[in-house]
Amino acid sequence: MSAVAALTGVLWHHAVVTDRGRTGISGRRSGLPTRLTPIAIALVTAIVAALAGCASKQSLPSPVGDPDPGHRRMAEIAPVLSVLPPGVQPIRRDKYEPVWDSCDAMPGTFGWDPVTVEVDWRYTGHDAHVLAHVSAVMKSLGWTPDHRTAADLSWHRELSTGGYATADLLGGASSRPPSWVMEALATAANHPIGGCV
């Protein structure tokens, strides 16, 4: 039996026995709930929750290694933020360093999230103009196209530091409002997150 379970049993038993052992004004055991019982139950519940929280945090894997030594992976994918068509201003332009994470909180799936960059913009012109411009810029940056759908493109590239990166362009005139999102991700240098589909 775990220490948490044992402590829970002791405290619960104490709360119940203390309550049932009380006598009423007549000197008989009342057996009825008193004001102490809800307080004791609340106290037991709070202690158990706190101990369980501590135990679960202690059992989670600690971060392993540096996911992006010298921020070199970020430096390799950051130029993707420049793919906007001429004259277009971004709505949002973000860089995300890796975070030690898990897709399902199970110990075996913990690892580093990818290094990520993302840029969003609105464009009311023709999709073909955006696709042609972004494709040309990505080619000049050393990215290889994977496939395309009606209005979406994806690319990949090997990183000079090892591993690979992927990029996706999503959106188009059919989105409301007409907008585009370009995202690039580079796998962590070591212990990448995994295990979930």
Image (cartoon, rainbow, N blue to C red):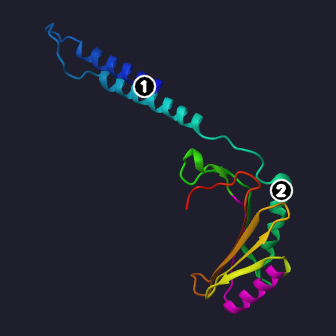
> Where is residue 87 drawn, in percent x and y?
80, 84
Instruction: Using the image as rendered, state which of residue 166 and residue 81 is in the foreground.
Output: 166
For the record, the magenta segment spans 114-139
> Where is residue 6 drawn, in percent x and y?
41, 22
Residue drawn at point x = 58 percent, y = 82 percent: 175
Q: Is residue 31 left or right of residue 180?
A: left
Residue drawn at point x = 84 percent, y = 63 percent: 75
> Where is residue 126 drawn, in percent x and y?
68, 92
Calculate the distance from the C-alpha at mark 1 to the C-alpha at mark 2.
Answer: 46 Å
Numbered circle sitting on residue 71 = 2
Q: Nearer the viewer, mark 1 or mark 2?
A: 1
Residue drawn at point x = 34 percent, y = 22 percent: 12
Callout 2 amino acid = His
Q: Residues within 10 Å of mark 1 (few under 14, many from 20)?
A: few
Residue 134 lies in magenta, yes or no?
A: yes
Numbered circle sitting on residue 1 = 1
Q: Quadrant of the N terminus?
A: top left
Q: Is residue 72 left or right of residue 99?
A: right
Instruction: Using the image as rendered, state which of residue 60 and residue 119 is in the foreground.
Output: 60
Residue 26 shows in the view:
yes
Q: Is residue 1 above or below residue 143?
A: above
